[in-house]
Image (tube, helix red, strand yellow):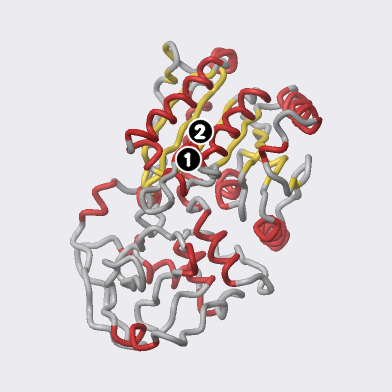
Amino acid sequence: MEQKINIFSFFSGAGFLDLGFELSGHFNVVYVNEFHKAFNDVYRYARSKMGIEQPKYGHHVEDITQIIGSSELEELKAQVSESKATTLTGIIGGPPCPDFSVAGRNRGKEGENGKLSGTYVSLICETLPDFFLFENVKGLYRTAKHREFFEHLKSLLIKNGYVLTEQLINSIEFGAPQDRDRIILIGFRKDVAKRLHLPFMKSELLEFDWEKNKLYSRDALSLPWPKTSPYKENVSTDAPDGIIKELTVEYWWEKNDVLNHPNANMYFQPRAGLYRFQSKDEGDDEKKCYKRLHRWRYSPTVAYGNNEVHIHPYKPRRISVAEALALQSLPKEFELPTTMTLTDAFKTIGNGVPFMAALGIAKNIIDYISSHN
């Protein structure tokens, strides 16, 4: 398939998911929607630094709920139709998910963020792209009361002509140094599936190879990773035997040269609670607050609400923006504006899909299409 596939992106944040699709070499993001201006500013800034073209249909800094039932919906439908006339066209996005997270608000479909999942599906059903991707927390998939809502959303997509495939993935399977489960739902319209010779039965898309671009098994989480080590400030240690070094915090920090990254000096200055930064064992992440990373282990989920950013393994401070970007497995060329607030910086980093997972899923989609064409 020579011509790039066009992508309309929603809930884009700083664009980690989009970047995975773009850098796979087979997709072109033509439309971006992000409600929070500070996050959209990051999106624009990072791509200008990386030399990536601006989206054909522009950036839309607005609430997705205001598109439904407005004149802008007709404009969006026209843009999707125009795109579909020249190349395969998809919509991708991960609606904000704290309302489905056990660690978050857990309000479900009635929460302000929970409602956005329904709005996103409605937008797909209104614009009818050739395919879509929906990303969310595992709580939507695994928690009984939320699973009922997830099945309802799927039924709406099926009624509008989509055949579906889904999997609960972990970012570590794709090479990101992070334990992060997410449900990924992918759908193709039946007429498109027929045109592309993609097999399906009733509402199920068949033979989609979710494993194709995974680098590791989920069993990697069960290796003899180090638990805790006494905190030693700025003391180097060797990697232990029996682990996968490429999945460790230290490996990615070295890979991304975080100490010389433009965002290296963006971190919260420790004031109150300095004793904890100097005494907590390396790798002690059992409690909700003051989680300290271990340099020779993968990170817990990178999600930084209320500025509760992980503590550096061997320095008396929280990790920097550069270090957090590396935990999200981004290319070292990706950078944030140094003028943005630390709260916004860490929030947009934590909200993003790890780049390596996004890249692997994008490759899975293109490999699936190519294998049948």
Q: Is residue 243 above or below residue 356?
A: below
The residue that disc 1 covers is 361
Choose between 282 and 193: the one closer to the eye.
282
Choose between 80 and 262: the one closer to the eye.
80
The residue that appears at 37% across and 53% down in the rendered structure is 103
Q: Secondary structure at mark 1?
A: helix
Corner quadrant of residue 161? top right
Are dots 2 and 1 in contact, CB under 8 Å?
yes
Q: Position of residue 277 (x, y in %)?
A: 36, 83
Q: Position of residue 65 (x, y in %)?
A: 67, 37
The answer to whether residue 356 is left or right of residue 35 is left
Q: Is residue 115 above or below residue 38?
A: above
The answer to whether residue 119 is left or right of residue 201 is right
| Dot 1 crowding, Cα within 10 Å, few <14, some 14–19, many 20+ | many
The residue that appears at 35% across and 77% down in the rendered structure is 313
- Cα distance, mark 2 to mark 1? 6 Å
Q: Is residue 351 above or below residue 317?
A: above
| Dot 2 crowding, Cα within 10 Å, few <14, some 14–19, many 20+ | some
Q: Quadrant of the C terminus?
A: top right
Q: Is residue 108 above or below residue 251?
A: above
The residue that appears at 39% across and 77% down in the rendered structure is 312
The residue that appears at 44% across and 30% down in the rendered structure is 149
Choose between 82 and 290: the one closer to the eye.
290
The count of marks equals: 2
Q: Position of residue 243 (x, y in %)?
A: 24, 62
The answer to whether residue 213 is left or right of residue 27 is left
The answer to whether residue 129 is left or right of residue 317 is right
Callout 1 amino acid: Ile
Callout 2 amino acid: Ile
The residue that disc 2 covers is 365
